[in-house]
Image (tube, helix red, strand yellow):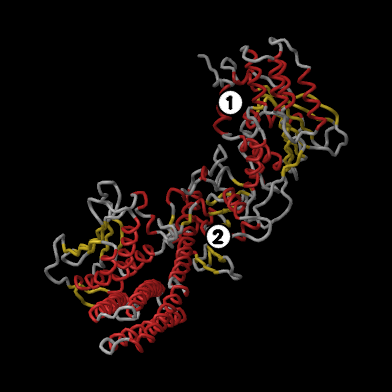
Amino acid sequence: MVKQPFRIKARTLVHLGAELITTDAIALNELIKNAFDAHSKEVRIDFDIPFDPQLGYRLAKDISKGEKTPQQAVEELQKNLADELEAVTAKSIKANLGKLPSDPKLFPAALEAFVNETCTIRVEDWGDGMSSKELLDVFLVIGTPVKQLQKKKGADTAILGDKGIGRLSMMRLGRFATVVSAKKETDKYHQIEFDWVGFDDPENYLDEINLEVMPAEPKNTLNESGTLIEITGLRSSWVEEDIKEFITYLRRLQDPFNTNHHRFPIKVYRNKQSQPIARMNRRLVESAQFEARFEVTPSYDRDSIMLSRQLRWKGQTTFEKRDWPVETLCNTLGVMPQDFISLGPLKVGCYWYNRRKLSHPTGEWDLRKIRDELNIWAGGFALYRDGFRIGLTGAEEGDWLRMSATALRGTGYRLNNIQTIGSIAISYAENPALIDTANREDLVDCPEYQLLAKLIKVVIVDDLRSTIHTYTDAESKNTLAEHASEESVKRAANDINSTLKQVNQLVQNVPKEIKPNVVSIRDNLKQHVDYIQTIQKSVELAQEKKIEILELAGIGMSVEIIAHELARVTIRTADLLGQLGEVSDEKELEKLIDSIESQLTSVNKRIKAIDPLSPSGRNRKEKFDLVAFIRSIFDGYAPRFKRHHVTASLTVDGEPPKHEIKVRLVRGFIAHIIENLLSNSMYWLVQAPQSPSSGRKIGIDMDRYGRFIELYDTGPGIDPSHIHDVFKPYFSYRKNGKGLGLYIARELAEYHGGKLYLSQDAQGDGRLRHFIIEFPKD
């Protein structure tokens, strides 16, 4: 019987490296972590990239194929030298390119060798270093358990890696590598040279490739120690944009909530020029709508606090606090205190941004820079172990909590990846059960990992979402309560007062027969002035007494509508009054007086229907005839319908109303919504070109049992892709629209237990035109 152990093809190592080290940034980060694990206080990375190495390799192939001449290749490389090269360095490279053999057969190999020699990445640290024995027994052992054993023994500093696969990073970065290292007690450096090309040969077995540890140059002093890794034959271009992207990756390695502001221990140089690695800019911190910090302190005592939260909104100086006792938190998540003990203590931080509300900062930073900085840092909750980010967590490509998929929303606001900068700080000492996946991009799935994810999604995110909704909802509705802007009310009052002056003059001059009518008009207008003043005082009083915010929003919208209508009818009244002085015919005078009184009667009807101070406008249910009520709203619109040639129809189940429909509802709730929908319909019917076939039509159809109302028109309609967007605050098709009307209407509907939505039934052109108001079931 023949016994033989498994033999591994050398190319298996290549495939293993590709699976475990998925990006160049992660590859370099593995080498950085190795340096810190060796107790180095600093790591330096030098990118000596005078030109794009991939361009050099392509030119060598082009010459081999006869597609370019050596002279053309040299000229192209000389033109593509990096701008920041020192003049002496650029001159030297150009000279050395000129010395390459001109023979097309010899040039490609010479050019490849020149690229390998010139374009390099060097990673250097001043940590413990390795002896020749450690290079053989540790560095050349894939999957070495040395770091795991250090963790078990209780290392004095954080161990950032533990899988023994960091050296595969060199394979990803370049075809060749040289590792030079020494410990303090040795008198010289030792080195290993790697040629990864041989590992990709399908004929080679791993145990057939021998690597030699060789003596290198002597040390200057015995106290010297550290490791230098030089990588050549680069597999990526590492031009300016690539290095900028890597710098951004390094910036994101830093926990934005870490209050330790020591100098960042990674230095990067590109062609001898230092590349700054900035922390998250404080302007971005100042621009956050809120900052929240959570702390988990596991305990067996069910009455003690296991989760605490501090949250501060922008502009506030104090924190809102909330605590979750052990028993509450465990019951919410369906776990035992022991599960949290196993997870270990941790900290969570969150900056949340409403991108619509980013304001211009003071100082040198403009709004564009704030947005650019937010795009770098936003991405949800990132995992940080001992101050360093794990993989790409906290970015769209590392959405381990699936926050983008679930898109946790408030009404018009979101707590999702693009608006959240989050940090979950763990450590190898406090959270030993949380282990990196082999590819370094996430954590291994285990009970502790599942508890962590559940804690974030079910408790922390839900708490933040509720906080956002409550605060922004109140903020938005306070804005809506002021929707009746001072300008609108003042304008209406000024118009009325101006018209009153005109009426007072007419009272002295008009014939005795119509004088009582003119006096009646004057008294009516005076009532409107008093009414506006009453409305203003009522809104102020409502704000002072902090009445239900949705009712306050309704009052604000009503005042806006009333102010608009009073201003419109007053201007029309003034026009007609102006004609009175020019007309002598008694019949013509009567017609003008009738027209004026009709205008005032019309606006009075509208005001009565939506008056927020009357019983119908307040939060009181009453029994009334729905048909008559909606007809009264239609009557208020009759002049506008006539003026703009709009045909309005009121039906019950598609037929003209024949009977009353008794309902017990809040009149103001229906009036506000229908007013908004009618106002929108009128706007778009007038703005859009009139259809020769359908004309301008508005219809309201009621369910005979009083369960719902459907409002439709023949306007331009709404694209189905915006079926939900039209109800979001600040979304508007109008050029100067506020985008608040439908938002208020839906909020009011939901507040009263009903629903408002856009029907999905599209018309022949595929657009949506039917709004449905569902009444509360009770």
Picture coordinates of residue 366 (x, y %)?
63, 55
- Check disc 2: other Cα within 10 Å, few if <14, some if 14-19, many if 20+: some
**Kind of residue at badge 1:** Val
The local secondary structure at tag 2 comes to strand
Q: Residue furthest left?
A: 658
- Above/below status of 696 relative to 189: below
Per the rendering, the mark at residue 14 is 1
Task: Decide if residue 618 is in sight here.
Answer: no
Q: Nearer the viewer, mark 1 or mark 2?
A: 1
Task: Decide if residue 441 is in sight here.
Answer: yes
Q: Is residue 739 left or right of residue 685?
A: right
Residue sitting nearer the eye, 141 or 27: 27
Residue at image coords 68%, 15% = 108
Per the rendering, the mark at residue 410 is none
Residue at image coords 38%, 87% = 504
Q: Quadrant of the C terminus?
A: bottom left
Picture coordinates of residue 556 (x, y %)?
41, 73
**Kind of residue at badge 2:** Val
Q: Earlier in the sequence, mark 1 or mark 2?
A: 1
Q: How many marks?
A: 2
Q: Residue furthest right?
A: 221
Q: CA distance from mark 1 to mark 2?
A: 42 Å
Provide the residue designation for mark 2. 296
Residue sitting nearer the eye, 5 or 524: 524
